[in-house]
Amino acid sequence: MKPRILKIDPYNIDHELLKQGVKMIHNRGLVAFPTETVYGLGANALDAKGVAGIFKAKKRPLDDPLIVHIAEMEDLYHLTKDIPPAAEKLVNRFWPGPLTIILKKNDMIPDIVTSGLDTVAIRMPSNQIAKKFISMAGVPIAAPSANLFGRPSPTTAKHVVDDLAGRIDIIFDGGKTEIGVESTVVKIDDGRVFVLRPGGVSIEELRSIVGEVRVPDESAELINSPGKYPEHYSPEAKVVLISSDARQIEKTLLSLWEMESYGLRVGVMAKQEHIDKYKNFNAKVLGPGKDGRTCATRLFQILREFDTEKVDVIIAEAISEEGLGLAVMNRLRKATRAAAS
Ligand code: TXA
Ligand code: MG
């Protein structure tokens, strides 16, 4: 069964089209919709059977909990309890927007949404199509990224079609997403703020609101703890992350020639300032190395393009970890690990 693809102009939203999605959600159907970060795959968060469909369509393990999306602040108080002051400060500053917060859940949220945890991830997106869709649905919407489990997250409706055609009911096509990487996931424990996943709100922005923020050391081995499934964001190709100093680039150029001489297809994801160095190869610009925000908008698109081109190896240049650069590097490191294992 082909999904119904409904094109929606974000500047002139057709409510009749949104109603089709609302009806589907109330019939336990699955609706993909744009958010400001990536496309989400939504079901009624209060209906366990509807939510079960998400796991099936994505081939996602049941022990990887979902994010519940809301449109009004009062829903936060219906769905959660014991909200710490730091959480209040963060949502007041960053909602609607790319911040997900983990809080104690209320009983109305079915276990399947949270994989049995007593906490729930909540986010209020700022994308106008998402906001309107959620408020018209009149229920919170459980939605992971709308990709097959383990694949790069979708930043266009086409990416959703490529992964999930035949497995879901409706796709709202609202064009390319604005940020391009997923939301920042934050948990507060004993008043201390922990970042579980860097994303669309930068660490610097979080610190400006709550002071100290703990970020996992990514050079340490990925530890598998409940509620933190090792996402891999992996394209088909093997991903190799390189530092981008002059000596490393010289070495990389040599190995690129060598790999091609063995008949391997290679792709390079380069910083804008280095693109000329790779002119003899299939190289794409991620963005200026100090501009994490721009790089974030292109990352998943480029990984998917290399897949379409059946590239075997992707050489990715490291970028600065300031601002959204941290989220970009986090996804690249995970893509590297997945390919190696
Ligand atoms: O930007 C985004 O966050 C997108 C859009 C669609 O909103 N959604 C998204 O969802 O990226 P997903 O399912 O791909 O990632 C959700 C992350 C997962 O790493 C999951 O393990 C974590 O949030 N998570 C969800 N509930 C949790 C909980 N109760 N405790 C700890 N982590 C949780
Ligand atoms: Mg995901």
Image (cartoon, rainbow, N blue to C red):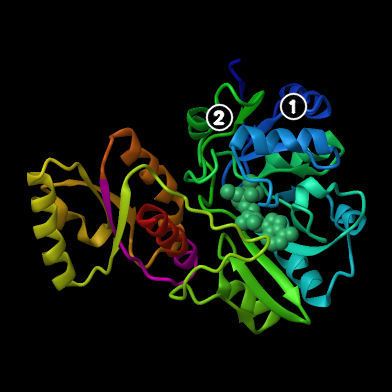
Q: Which residue is mark 2?
A: 164
Q: Which residues are magenta?
A: 313-327
Instruction: Look at the picture and state if 109 lies above or below 214.
Output: above
Quarter of the image containing the N terminus? top right
Dot 2 lies on which element? helix
Q: Which residue is mark 1?
A: 29
Toward the bottom, the furthest residue is 212
The answer for how far apart the CA atoms under marks 1 and 2 are is 14 Å
- Three-letter residue code for mark 1: Gly
Instruction: From the top left corner, tell me how far across and down residue 252 is, in percent.
Output: 16, 61
Residue nearest the viewer, comparing 236 with 180 = 236
Q: Is residue 326 magenta?
A: yes
- Three-letter residue code for mark 2: Leu
Instruction: From the top left corner, tell me how far across and down residue 168 is, in percent.
Output: 64, 26
Ligand 1 position by quadrant:
bottom right
Instruction: Look at the picture and state if 73 lies above or below 209.
Output: above
Instruction: From the top left corner, tell me how far across and down residue 230 is, in percent.
Output: 54, 58
Q: Judge from the rendering whether residue 167 lies leftward or rightward of residue 300; answer left or right.
A: right
